Each structure stands twice: as C-alpha cells, then as structure tokens.
Image: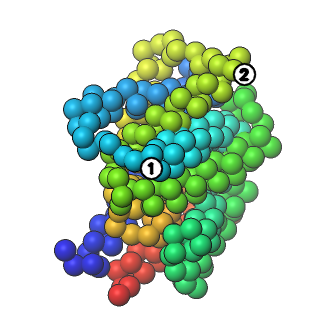
Amino acid sequence: MDPSRTRLIGYASALAAGTLWATTGPLSTALYAEGAEVTGVGFWRIAIAVVALTPYALIRAKDFRIDGRGLLAVGLGGGALVALFEVAYQFAIAGTGVAGAAALLYTAPVIVAILAVPLLDEGLTILRLTLAVMVAVGAFLTVQGGQGGGVGLPGLGAGVVGGLLAALAYAGTTLIARWAVPRYGVAPVLFYEILGGTLILGLVLVATGQTPAVPQSGGAWVYVLSLSLGTIILANLFFFQALRRIEAAPAAVAATIEPVFAALLALTFFGQGLSVFGWMGLVLVVLGVAGGYVEEAVRE
C-alpha cells in the first residue's frame, strides 16, 4: 500500500477512536445520575471489556502469547496507567463536566510529542510541536469556557487534578502502545493492558475499602456495557490500528477531536454549554487536528 495512504488510514483510525471516546463523558454522567460511584464506573468499564475479550483470547491463544518483556511493559506498566486513567478521568468528568474533562485530557499530545523523541526516536518537527501546543491551548480555553459537572460529586479542583493525571496516563499508554503494538499485535496489547488495569484497580479499590458496587438498574448496565464495548474495546482497537501506521505524536493529535464531539454531546444532552472562549478553544482543536491530517497527507 502507498505510504501516504497508509498514514491517512492511520490518522482516520485515530479520529474514529477520538469520536468514540467522546461518548465517555455523557455515558458516565448518565451513570452518576443512576447513583453509580466515580471509582466504580472506571472499574466496571474495563472489567467488562476484559470479560468480553477473554473468549477470543482463549480461542486465539497462540496469537496472544507475548514474551516476559512485553507482559511487564503492557500488563504491568500499561495496566497501572490504565488503572490510574480510569479513576482520574471519572473524577475529571464529575468535577469539570464532559467538555472540560475531555479538554484537560488533551494536553496529552504535547507530552506525547516531547517524550516520543527520546523514548521512540520519533522526530519533533516545528509543525508537530506547534500542532500539539495548539490543541493544548484549545483544551485550556475549553476548560475556562466550560461548565462543571453539576452532579454533586468532586469539585472543580479535584476535577482539574483528575484531568491532568488522566492526561499523563493517556500519554504513557500511547507511548507504550506505539512500542508494543507493532511487536505483539493490536488485540493482545489491548487485552493484557486492560487485564492488568482491572487487576490493579480492583486490588487498590478493595484495599482502600472502596469495593466497586455492581450496577443496580437495567439502565446502568446499558450505560456500562456501552462504555466497555464502545469506549474501551472498539475505540482502542481503532487507536491501536492507528499506532501501527503512524507515529505516536500525530495519532495523539488526531484523537484530540474528542473534545469537539464531547462538547456537542454535553450541550445536547446535559445543557453543559460553552462560552465564547470555550468555542474558540474547540476551534483551535479542530484546526490542530486538521493540520495534522494535512501533515500526514503531504509527508514524504
């Protein structure tokens, strides 16, 4: 396949992942309204994803064999970052609102662009750094122009801290996946990463006396299943496919389309509007994502 076409398919896959991830906030907010706990939402969405993938992993056991180095990096390192992300991002959603949480999360492309140089030997061009900074500034403006979660859970301060921790965790899992997916494949990396995350998060929650409560209503189960199948399995399969074809920095920029869709969903379903600065921030995000698309299209 032509290299430029391969890169564009990778970029489109990252865009698809970001679009699916945008439903995380609205679905989580709906779960809060059902009485779900912040920590429980994060645990159940990855735990159910593990259960859903396990039969496939058993059937294709030969393809899911990876070496000790891979298990350590993906299962332990990636799993710990997944566990951190699942709790931190739920606090961000509850404290800063859907659009604010997604915007805080996407300070991550700057982290990815910088760390990918020493860790993955990726090039840091002026354009890549500019695009990453552009989407980060857009994310900041979106937070400044957004509304809080309004669900009576963590406050704005806890939400902002949660969003920044989620960004660090997301950047880390992106870098690990960029290294691991070409070596071990998309499905094995996803499976061992969320398996590790489920075990680590489960142990931490039980040890701290916060054993996750089982969803209590049919509606809650629908929301949790949607989170697991859509935002964990399908979205990450798209994103990992992107990381097979393009470098970590442009993939992270492409996925930054999430705050745009998250803001629109929040406005439509929860009345969480944006001020002029918020909309300006989303415009910057769109321009940064579009610039990344052009870069991948013309790069030799």
**Residue placed at 34% from the left, 67% from the top?**
245
Residue 208: numbered disc: 2
Q: Which residue lies furthest to the right in this view?
A: 157
Amino acid of disc 1 = Gly
Tell me the SS state at disc 1: helix
Picture coordinates of residue 64 (x, y %)?
31, 42
**Residue placed at 37% from the left, 26% from the top?**
51
Residue 70: numbered disc: 1
246, above or below 89, in the image: below
Between label 2 and label 1, give the one nearer the viewer: 1
Check the picture and name the quadrant holding the C terminus: bottom left
Name the foreground residue: 214 vs 257: 214
Instruction: Give the mark nearest the N terminus, 2 or 1.
Output: 1
228 left or right of 199 in image: left
Q: In this orientation, does residue 109 appear?
A: yes
74, above or below 53, in the image: below
Picture coordinates of residue 127 (x, y %)?
54, 83
Could you say which quadrant of the image residue 221 lies in?
A: top left
The mark tally for this picture is: 2
